[in-house]
Image (cartoon, rainbow, N blue to C red):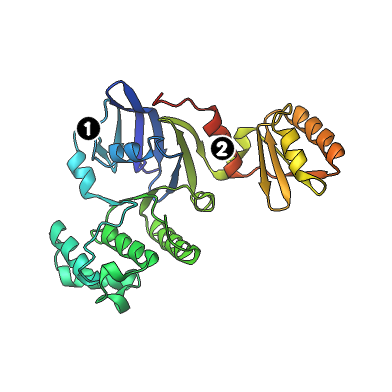
């Protein structure tokens, strides 16, 4: 088997007495789409910057694209495409002019042909003379992706790339990402959207600097050991109030005309839900645990490293 595109061990970053990335170890295979998830302030972006050569770790070691993350940071940066959440191109230049500027920064030759190839690949050719500032969120996102892959990187890092775009644009974007991965590009993407996490080959969850779990979505959900029950009908408002402090109940959330009740202790949870259902005239049934339930549980059990 080929070496991983990313392989880091014990990755740690401190600012003063605060440890924002705490002993993170993970591997990402070449051609894999790895979802990187966690709450705001969890250390995702700092970890990404350590991996792509923008920051030097205080502890730990690793290799990215065969290069040492401490001694070959420049080589890593040349082979990475990094798309940030904030649109950062010149709004008073056209799509083509922005891409030509990026080609010049990288010293790409022949730049005109490479820009045209990129326009064609990302479906931007028909809008090449449109000002970047006049683009919708979805087209700005597509321009940002085009600029990130034009120099043919081996690793694409996406930091919450679909924030603020509509569902159709998000789906089109992910179709592009899967096409790039099939061609051998490795992708590390941070996201808050559960449906996007489910489109990744594997996911990693970080909370307050600590890596909590990695695996496929199915593996992560199964390893969490949660039970989920649904209540429907009756007085759901009263049921929600009664279940908040009931034995075995870790989460209670309304979903449309149902209550979504989650806990680790299946026996205690079932007894509490059955009792409350009887009191409130509701019916209850088993349901599949969702990825969102797992992440909320992890957030609740993690210790805030900023306190």
As rendered, which of 174 and 267 lies closer to the eye?
A: 267
Sequence-wise first label, 2 or 1: 1
The picture places residue 179, in percent across and down from the top left corner, at: 42, 62
Residue assigned mark 1: 70
Tell me the crowding category of disc 2: few under 14, some 14 to 19, or many 20 or more residues within 10 angstroms, Cα based. some
Q: Which mark is residue 296?
A: 2
Q: Could you say whether the residue bearing mark 1 is in a helix, strand or loop? A: loop
Q: Residue at x 16, y 64 (%)?
A: 101
The picture places residue 251, in percent across and down from the top left corner, at: 65, 36
Image: 153 above or below 284: below
Instruction: Locate the N terminus by quadrant.
Output: top left
The picture places residue 253, in percent across and down from the top left corner, at: 66, 42
Q: Residue at x 22, y 69 (%)?
A: 115
- Separation (CA) of disc 2 from disc 1: 34 Å
Q: How many marks?
A: 2
Q: Based on the displayed image, in which of its 4 quarters is residue 143 positioned? A: bottom left
**In the image, is 241 to the left or to the right of 110?**
right
State which mark lies toward you, 2 or 1: 2
Residue extending farthest top: 17
Image: 143 above or below 232: below
**In the image, is 279 to the left or to the right of 257?**
right
Tell me the crowding category of disc 1: few under 14, some 14 to 19, or many 20 or more residues within 10 angstroms, Cα based. some
**In the image, is 38 to the left or to the right of 102?**
right
The picture places residue 217, in percent across and down from the top left corner, at: 56, 44
As rendered, which of 71 and 279 lies closer to the eye?
A: 279
Question: Is there any visible trace of residue 80 in the rendered image?
Answer: yes
As rendered, which of 257 and 31 lies closer to the eye?
A: 257
Q: Could you say whether the residue bearing mark 2 is in a helix, strand or loop? A: helix
Q: Residue at x 77, y 28 (%)?
A: 267
Image: 126 above or below 8: below
């Amino acid at each position: 088997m080929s070496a991983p595109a990313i392989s880091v061990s014990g990755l740690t970053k401190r600012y003063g007495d605060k440890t924002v990335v705490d002993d993170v170890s993970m591997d990402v295979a070449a051609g894999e789409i790895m979802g990187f998830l966690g709450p705001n302030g969890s250390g995702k972006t700092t970890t990404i910057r350590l991996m792509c050569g923008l920051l030097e770790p205080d502890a730990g070691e690793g290799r990215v694209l065969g290069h040492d993350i401490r001694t070959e940071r420049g080589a890593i940066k040349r082979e990475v495409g990094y798309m940030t959440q904030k649109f950062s191109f010149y709004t008073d230049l056209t799509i083509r002019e922005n891409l030509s500027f990026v080609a010049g920064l990288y010293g790409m030759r022949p730049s005109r042909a490479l820009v045209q190839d990129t326009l064609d690949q990302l479906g931007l050719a028909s809008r090449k003379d449109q000002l970047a500032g006049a683009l919708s969120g979805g087209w700005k996102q597509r321009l940002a992706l085009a600029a990130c892959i034009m120099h043919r990187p081996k690793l694409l890092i996406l930091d919450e790339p679909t924030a603020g775009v509509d569902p159709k644009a998000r789906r089109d974007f992910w179709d592009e990402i899967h096409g790039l991965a099939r061609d051998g590009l490795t992708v590390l993407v941070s996201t808050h959207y559960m449906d996007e996490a489910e489109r990744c080959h594997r996911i990693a969850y970080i909370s307050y600097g600590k890596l909590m779990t990695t695996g496929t979505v199915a593996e992560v959900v199964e390893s969490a050991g949660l039970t989920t029950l649904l209540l429907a009908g009756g007085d759901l408002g009263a049921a929600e109030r009664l279940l908040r402090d009931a034995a075995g109940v870790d989460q209670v959330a309304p979903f449309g005309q149902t209550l979504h009740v989650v806990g680790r202790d299946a026996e205690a949870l079932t007894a509490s839900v059955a009792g409350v259902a009887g009191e409130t005239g509701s019916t209850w049934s088993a349901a599949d645990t969702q990825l969102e339930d797992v992440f909320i549980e992890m957030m609740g059990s993690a210790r805030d490293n900023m306190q």
